[in-house]
Image (tube, rainbow, N blue to C red):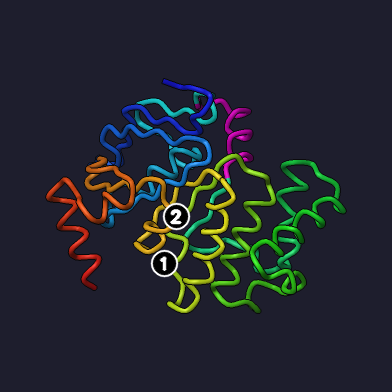
Amino acid sequence: MNSAENMVVLQNLKKHFTGIEALDGVSLTVKKGQVIVIIGPSGSGKSTLLRCVNQLEEKSSGEIWVDGERLTRNSKQLDKVRSEIGMVFQHFNLYPHLTVLENITLAQRIVKKISKQLAIENAMAQLKRVGIEEKADKFPAQLSGGQQQRVAIARALAMNPKLMLFDEPTSALDPEMIKEVLEVMLDLAKAGITMIVVTHEMGFARAAADEVVFMDKGQIVEQAIPADFFANPKQERTRLFLSQILNH
């Protein structure tokens, strides 16, 4: 079940909120180096799944394994797991009173106990990777939304994560800024970083995903490689969703 090549294994994962079955028996395996793109209507459980993987939400039942380790609510393990999983949210969650550089070095120094000089070198390398090293001394308010999201990606990468989770990373952006963020994510996918991406961007799913997962009502309805998923969906529910999304 949990071979060395698996980065994430979910087994019969359930999450209830009051009156809502957000996740209803989800099982999913993500291999190391794989890019899994999760799509589905609002309220289908996509974001809840990500939040359970990095322990921002506590599962109701089921099993979660990350890199061979079964996740529990042990606080030491929680801290370790969170430090090894990069999470990029819909909203950038940058500290407005800190410069770009300070935003990226903060967690490295506090969580990883890295020296200031090393944290700065690491931050600059990641800013270069996402194409905005010249913005290091700016404050978030001085950047466009796309640039802020690229800073958030650089901040996650600076922690040298085993796994990157993206929760609708482009949904708060203007259309012209979406492309610059997706290009950065495409580069990460090509670099072999293990990624689980929740998105509405079907072009990204086609270009970057090893597998596309369609969720609805807290369950995985269909899972396939992009060519099969988009050209020949097996489930009626998937076909309906794609017809609505792709015809807009």
Give how far apart the Cα atoms at labels 2 and 1 are: 18 Å
Q: Which residue is mark 1?
A: 171
Q: Disc 2 marks which amino acid?
A: Ala
- Whether residue 179 can be seen here: yes
> What crowding class fits label 2: few (fewer than 14 Cα within 10 Å), some (14-19), or many (20 or more)?
many
Residue in the image at 24% along x and 73% along y? 248
User: Over which residues does the magenta segment extend?
Assistant: 71-85
Residue in the image at 53% along x and 59% along y? 185
Query: In the rendered image of this protein, does residue 121 appear above or below residue 172?
Result: above
**Mark 2 / mark 1, whichever is N-terminal:** 1
Residue at the extreme left of the image, as rendered: 236
**Mark 2 secondary-structure assignment:** helix
- Left or right placement of residue 206 versus residue 160 in this view: left
**Mark 1 secondary-structure assignment:** loop
Q: Which residue is mark 2?
A: 208
Q: Position of residue 130 (x, y in %)?
A: 64, 64
